C-alpha cells in the first residue's frame, strides 16, 4: 500500500440559487492540491502550507480538524502529515474550506485502504467545515467528494443524493476580490421566512432537480431563482444586480451568488454562451476599481481525485 499521495481537491458552488445549504455542484477549473503522507509517529501534523496564510495548528486548521475527526474514529496504528497547496482563495465563495477538509479525509482514507464510504468522508469533513463557517452544512463538501450535482437530503443522519449532470452545462464564475466570511454572511439572514416565499423556493428546488434529471435547459432557466437568501446577501457584493442583468442578457440560464459569495456563478448551455457571459460579466467589474478573476468550467462529474 502507498505511503503518500497527491490529490486535486476541487472548488465547488453551493446553494445553486434556490437550494440554500442543500444543493451544490463541482468545478474542474479550480482546486487545491494536497499531499497526504503516512508516518510512524502517531497524530496529525500540517507540515507545509503554500498560497495563503493559514494556521499550522491542527485544531485550528479546517483540514486538520477534519483529519482529526476521522483519525479519532479510525484509531489507526500510524500518523499522517498534510501538505496544503492552497489555490482557492479563502472567503471566495467557491468552497475553499470544503476543499481543504475533503482533501485530508479523502487522502487518509486512500492510504488506509478505503475503510470509509463517500458519505462517511463527508461526515468527517463537516467537522472541519464547521470550524470555518460555524455551521455544519455539507453543500460544498458533498459535490467535492461525489462530483457533479448533489443534494444533501439531511445532515442528521447524513443523507446525500447524486443528481445527473446535463452534458451541455458550463459554469462561468466571477470572483470580485473582496472577502466575505461565511459566518458573517449567515448571520445577516432572517431566522424566519414567509410561507409564500418558502413555497416558491421549494417549488424551484424540485423543478431544478427534475430539470437536471431530464436535461431540460429551459426548466433549469426557470428554476434558478433564489428569492430567500439573495435579497439579503447581494448587498455584500458590489454591482451584483448589474452583473446578473448582463449575464442574463448574454444568455445565461441563471445567475446567483456562489455559496456565501462574493463569487457569482452562472450556468449556461454550451461553451459559446459561457464565453459570451464571461465577457459580459467581466465588462461590469472592469469599469470599477475592484479586481476580479473569472473562469469557465465544465461541471466536474468525478470530484476529488488522486493525481500521482
Ligand atoms: N450554504 C452555505 C451558505 C455555503 O450559503 O452559507 C457556504 O459555506
Image (cartoon, rainbow, N blue to C red):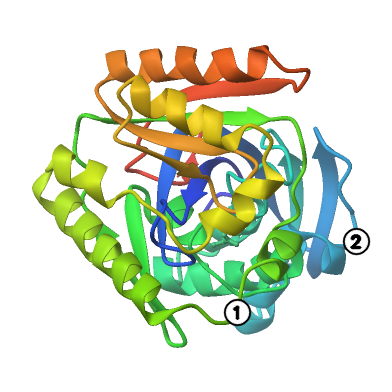
Outermost residue, left direction? 214
Up-down relation of residue 186 to residue 30 (above or below) = below
Q: Residue at x 56, y 49 (%)?
A: 2
Secondary element type, mark 1: helix
Give how far across and how far down residue 151 sits, in percent. Answer: 35, 65
Is residue 43 visible in this depiction of the protein? Answer: yes
The quadrant holding residue 102 is: bottom right
User: Which residue matches tag 2?
Assistant: 57
User: Which residue matches tag 1?
Assistant: 74
Closer to us: 164 or 107: 164
Give how far across and how far down residue 281 sits, in percent. Answer: 51, 21
Locate residue 83 relative to residue 58 in the image: left or right. Answer: left
User: How many numbered callouts?
Assistant: 2
The quadrant holding residue 168 is: top left
Q: Residue at x 54, y 64 (%)?
A: 112
Locate residue 150 relative to residue 62 in the image: left or right. Answer: left
Dot 2 or dot 1, earlier in sequence: 2
Amino acid at each position: 500500500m502507498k505511503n503518500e499521495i497527491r490529490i486535486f481537491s476541487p472548488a465547488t458552488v453551493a446553494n445553486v440559487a434556490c437550494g440554500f445549504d442543500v444543493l451544490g455542484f463541482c468545478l474542474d477549473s479550480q482546486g487545491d492540491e494536497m499531499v497526504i503522507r503516512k508516518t510512524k509517529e502517531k497524530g496529525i501534523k500540517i507540515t507545509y502550507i503554500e498560497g495563503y496564510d493559514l494556521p499550522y495548528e491542527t485544531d485550528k486548521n479546517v483540514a486538520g480538524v477534519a483529519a482529526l475527526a476521522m483519525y479519532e474514529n479510525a484509531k489507526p496504528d500510524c500518523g499522517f502529515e498534510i501538505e496544503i497547496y492552497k489555490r482557492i482563495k479563502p472567503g471566495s465563495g467557491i468552497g475553499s474550506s470544503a476543499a481543504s477538509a475533503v482533501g485530508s479525509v479523502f487522502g487518509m482514507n486512500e492510504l488506509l485502504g478505503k475503510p470509509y464510504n463517500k458519505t462517511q468522508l463527508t461526515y468527517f469533513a463537516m467537522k472541519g467545515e464547521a470550524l470555518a463557517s460555524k455551521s455544519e452544512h455539507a453543500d460544498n463538501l458533498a459535490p467535492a467528494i461525489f462530483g457533479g450535482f448533489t443534494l444533501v437530503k439531511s445532515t442528521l443522519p447524513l443523507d446525500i443524493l447524486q443528481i445527473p449532470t446535463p452534458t451541455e452545462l458550463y459554469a462561468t464564475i466571477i470572483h470580485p476580490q473582496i472577502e466575505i466570511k461565511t459566518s458573517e454572511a449567515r448571520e445577516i439572514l432572517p431566522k424566519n421566512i414567509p410561507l409564500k416565499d418558502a413555497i416558491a423556493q421549494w417549488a424551484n428546488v424540485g423543478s431544478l432537480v427534475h430539470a437536471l434529471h431530464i436535461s431540460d435547459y429551459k426548466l433549469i432557466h426557470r428554476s434558478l431563482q433564489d428569492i430567500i437568501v439573495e435579497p439579503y446577501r447581494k448587498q455584500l457584493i458590489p454591482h451584483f444586480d448589474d452583473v446578473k442583468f448582463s449575464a442574463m442578457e448574454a444568455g445565461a440560464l441563471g445567475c446567483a451568488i456562489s455559496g456565501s459569495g462574493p463569487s457569482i456563478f452562472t450556468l449556461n448551455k454550451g461553451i459559446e454562451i459561457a464565453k459570451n457571459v464571461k465577457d459580459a460579466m467581466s465588462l461590469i467589474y472592469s469599469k470599477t476599481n475592484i479586481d476580479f478573476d473569472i473562469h469557465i468550467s465544465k461541471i466536474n462529474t468525478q470530484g476529488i481525485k488522486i493525481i500521482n
